[in-house]
Amino acid sequence: MRIAVLVKQVPSTDKVKMDEETGTMVRSAMDAELNPLDLYAVEEAVRAKEKTEETEITVISMGPPAAASAIKEAIAMGCDKGVLLSDKVFSGADTWATARTLSSAIEKIGPYDLIFAGERATDGETGQVGPSVAAQLDMPVLTYVSKIREVNGARIVVERAVEGGHEVVEASLPALVSVVKEINEPRIPTLKGKIRAKQTEVPVMTAQDVGLDAAHAGLLGSPTRVVKVFYPSLSRNGTIVDGRDPERAVNALVQFLKDKALV
Amino acid sequence: MKSTEGTFQSVWTLGEQRDGRISPVSYELLAWGRDLADKRGTTLASVILGYNLKDRVNTLIEHGADIIYVVDNPALEHAYPDAHAAVLEKLVREFLPEIFIASATTYGRTIMPVLAAKLETGLTADCTGLDIDPETGLLIQTRPAIGGNVMATIKTPKHRPQMSTVRPRSRKPLASDASRKGQVIVRECPDDAYASKVKFLEFIKDETTALPIQEAEIVVSGGKGLKDAKNFQMVHELADLLGASVGASRQAVDLGWIPYSHQVGLSGKTVSPHLYVCAGVSGAVQHIAGMSSADIVVAINNDPDAPIFRVCDFGIVGDAIEIIPILIEKLQSQKATSPK
Ligand SMILES: Cc1cc2nc3c(=O)[nH]c(=O)nc-3n(C[C@H](O)[C@H](O)[C@H](O)COP(=O)(O)OP(=O)(O)OC[C@H]3O[C@@H](n4cnc5c(N)ncnc54)[C@H](O)[C@@H]3O)c2cc1C
Ligand SMILES: Cc1cc2nc3c(=O)[nH]c(=O)nc-3n(C[C@H](O)[C@H](O)[C@H](O)COP(=O)(O)OP(=O)(O)OC[C@H]3O[C@@H](n4cnc5c(N)ncnc54)[C@H](O)[C@@H]3O)c2cc1C
């Protein structure tokens, strides 16, 4: 099987520091890392490889040159190789333009039987890139996948975590699968894996290399425009009561809930 | 589609059904849609795909729609993204809506990006606010991103329809009005639109009868401050009493007190209930990311400096293990005395 995994580099969330006064993020305290939810996609790809002979996994990411390190993290976990899509004209892409760039590259370096994506990236958080890539490549998309029951070169059977339960569906390949956190426990890269990742060259492809017109890439090719970004005030200035007298505190709470018609 | 490709008008919402029953989120969406259509001086239509639902769609009119487009076909019974998007694409290209919104459910979040890709238009995810720009008439879409730390306002200036998914429970449905009149249009599509590469096999229902936390009106959460699994039971008791679903911090999940599906936060579920009560939860930024859009927040924590107190409407500084049983008792006697 030929497998591709789509990964994005994002600001590290465990490094997020909040400004106590304004309730906003302190940006300088952030580093970049592989999108935490993409670890599950990488892990699932590696497991599929372990079960199916002659499987090769390519990690694909669109991003700045530094995003090569996210690809290397995935290689360290067991993927075979990577491609970085990097070009000035890619910057400012919305999900449509991101998907257009990724699908152009896949058409160039593919085809793949199976493409994995994360549920969402922890920064943009739209969850739209996976389904959009599938649509542009005209292949079925299986979202919110929490278990792969069966996969071979021709078909895949999965469980999807949806409202109120799990839906079991089958699809013909090629298909794109976006996975949720429940699906597995991502492995920690071995030292051997890390060394291999370090030694692996990650080739860079530009818009021209993937055959994409600059008018369809980046900000220029994006139908949406972020016109304003603001920081919601987290502070609510609530009533705080002392619980050392628990009876009184609870009475005050019950009164509060009554006033709000909640009980 | 470029805005110059035709005359785009009217506001559409995507209705949702399961087993031929219309999901409540469909009505919430109509409340948003009604506002937008009135501000644009245009009609509000709801599109719904499924099987055996032709006779049940009148409730959509009662909740605010002027027109219902129904495509009723056995091939659409399950939410196959390729078939559903293909049918929707045909309808959009025929009727040219200016705005098309769906719920940010697993259905809406799957179908809408596929449809937007096919239509070559923009899609804004998981909006918590929608409005019309009085000057340009464009849809103003507001959404949280980066773990709720940032709000972004997004427009789709030159492509149509302007599409968004809307966070469930960000709005109450309009009161149902049985006297409202509307038009039901039943459409058929060419066979190829119904073709899907996906096949439904079975549905495994969640065992718990409680609502999934994302859908609950009230959520009661517990954190590490409850000390052990036995104390965590108090959270379930309090939740039962309030008709609430149970949530948890990551620490409580990692300690094995409750399954992951109950985790609230950045790497768990996002909830937006009317009331969020939490005990022994410190209020880490990753936790707050999952509950900051709750209407009312109540916190119980023994540390007066816990960050959760900065985002609560009512807080008790004290020992949750002592306070929750008293609260349960008071609510019980309250329930016993107030006839409902
Ligand atoms: C505050 C803010 C709000 C935004 N809102 C919107 C919006 O509503 N609509 C919109 O169209 N754009 C939006 N964008 C732009 C959007 O973030 C970018 O298009 C981004 O490149 C991809 O979207 P995402 O981060 O939401 O990824 P998601 O769609 O959440 O990512 C899902 C999966 O797709 C794959 N993937 C995503 N990006 C890449 C990549 N660069 N390379 C390889 N694989 C990838 C990964 O597997 C990932 O797990 C917004 C940006 C910001 C900063
Ligand atoms: C990438 C990433 C993603 C994450 N995602 C999530 C997520 O989705 N959800 C999430 O919740 N966390 C998440 N976290 C973890 C988060 O940073 C915190 O570690 C976690 O939320 C803390 O859980 P807690 O509040 O239960 O525990 P603690 O932070 O240990 O807080 C316990 C609180 O209980 C109080 N307490 C102690 N005893 C009592 C008592 N007797 N009565 C009352 N109060 C008492 C303490 O004062 C303290 O404030 C994530 C972290 C990372 C790095």
Image: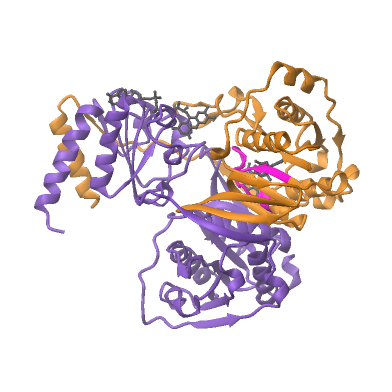
Chain colours: A orange, B purple
The residue positioned 62% from the left and 36% from the top of the image is A40
The residue positioned 13% from the left and 47% from the top of the image is B334
The residue positioned 41% from the left and 52% from the top of the image is B215
Residue B99 appears left or right of B120: left
Q: Is residue B161 visible?
A: no
Q: Relative to B124, does residue B307 appear above or below in the rendering?
A: above
In the rendered image, residue B293, in percent from the top left (x then y), is placed at 43, 45
Q: Relative to B126, does residue A77 appear above or below in the rendering?
A: above
Residue B131 appears left or right of B298: right
Which quarter of the picture shows residue B195? Answer: bottom right
Q: Quadrant of the N terminus of chain A?
A: top right
Q: Residue furthest left?
A: B337
Range of magenta residues:
A115-131
Residue B308 appears left or right of A101: left
Residue B102 appears left or right of B282: right
Q: Is residue B122 magenta?
A: no
In the rendered image, residue B275, in percent from the top left (x then y), is placed at 32, 46
The residue positioned 86% from the left and 38% from the top of the image is A205
Q: Quadrant of ligand 1?
A: top right
Q: Relative to B38, does residue B145 appear above or below in the rendering?
A: above
